[in-house]
Amino acid sequence: MKLFGLVFFLAIVCIAATTPAATGSGAEEPRYTPDNRMLRPDHYREWVWLSSGLGMSYTPGPADGNPGFDNVFVNPSAYRSFIATGKWPDKTVLVLETRSSVSKSSINQSGRVQGEMTGMEIHVKDERRFPGKWAFFGFDNSSQSGTLIPTSANCYSCHKQHGAVDTTFVQFYPTLMDVAKQKGTVQPGY
C-alpha cells in the first residue's frame, strides 16, 4: 500500500512539473508561424493586468470626443522577473488591447465603460529573433496571428526615446515604475 501511494504521488508531481502553467513557459512564450507572423497568445486576459488608459494619444491635438480604452497585460513569468529585477527578461510579451468606450450602457447614466475590442498590438522581447531585441506586432480583431510592424515605424523610435525601462512605457504602470526606481533600472534622462 505504501508503494502504491508513493508511485501515485510521484506520478502527480511529474504531471504537474511538465505542464506549461507549472513551468511558466509554453503558453506564455511568444509563438510564431513559419512566415514570421506572431500567434495571438491564448488566454492573455488571464495574465497580469498592468494598467488601463482612457483616450491616450502620443501626438498633440484635440481630445477625441469618444476616447478609447487601452488595457495592458504581461505574461506572468515576465512580471515576476520584473518585480525581482526591475528588468524585462527575454520572452516578455506585453499585450495592448484597445476597446471602444461606451456611455449610457445598461444602468450607467454617466461616465464610460469598456465596449468592443477595436485592436491589439504586442510588444515582444525575443533576443534571438529580432536584431533590436524587441519587436511590435499588429493584430486585427479576429485574426489569430499578427503582422510584424517594420522597424521604420514610429513605435520603435518613440519607445526607444520615451520608454522608462528597456523601450517600454513602464511610466504608465505605477506599481512597476516604483519597482524600476527601487532597482535603479529607469533609463537615464527619463
Image: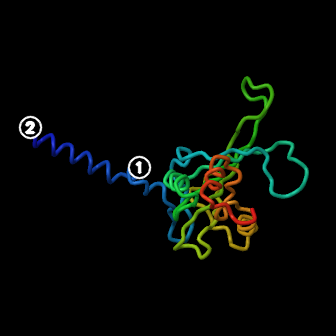
The amino acid beneath tag 2 is: Met
- Determine the residue positioned at 69% across, 57% down: 169
Q: Position of residue 172 (x, y in %)?
A: 71, 51
Residue highlighted by disc 2: 1
Q: Position of residue 34 (x, y in %)?
A: 50, 70
The residue nearer to you, when weighing 180 against 11, is: 180
Q: Which mark is residue 13?
A: none
| Neighbours of disc 1 within 10 Å: few (<14), some (14-19), many (20+) | some
The amino acid beneath tag 1 is: Ala
The kind of secondary structure element at disc 1 is helix
Tally the marks: 2
With respect to residue 82, does 156 lie above or below? Answer: below
**Mark 2–mark 1 distance (CA, rounded to whole Å):** 31 Å
Q: Position of residue 26 (x, y in %)?
A: 43, 57
Question: Are dots 2 and 1 in contact, CB under 8 Å?
Answer: no
Q: Which mark is residue 21?
A: 1
- Determine the residue positioned at 91% across, 50% down: 62
| Neighbours of disc 2 within 10 Å: few (<14), some (14-19), many (20+) | few
Q: If the image is split into quadrants, where does the N terminus sit? A: top left
- Determine the residue positioned at 15% across, 40% down: 5
- Label located before the other in sequence (2 or 1): 2
What residue occupies the far right of the structure in this picture? Answer: 62
The kind of secondary structure element at disc 2 is loop
With respect to residue 147, does 96 lie above or below? Answer: above
- Is residue 122 found left or right of 5 in the rendered image? right
What residue occupies the far bottom of the structure in this picture? Answer: 131
The residue nearer to you, when weighing 152 against 119, is: 152
Q: Position of residue 90 (x, y in %)?
A: 52, 65
With respect to residue 71, does 188 lie above or below? Answer: below
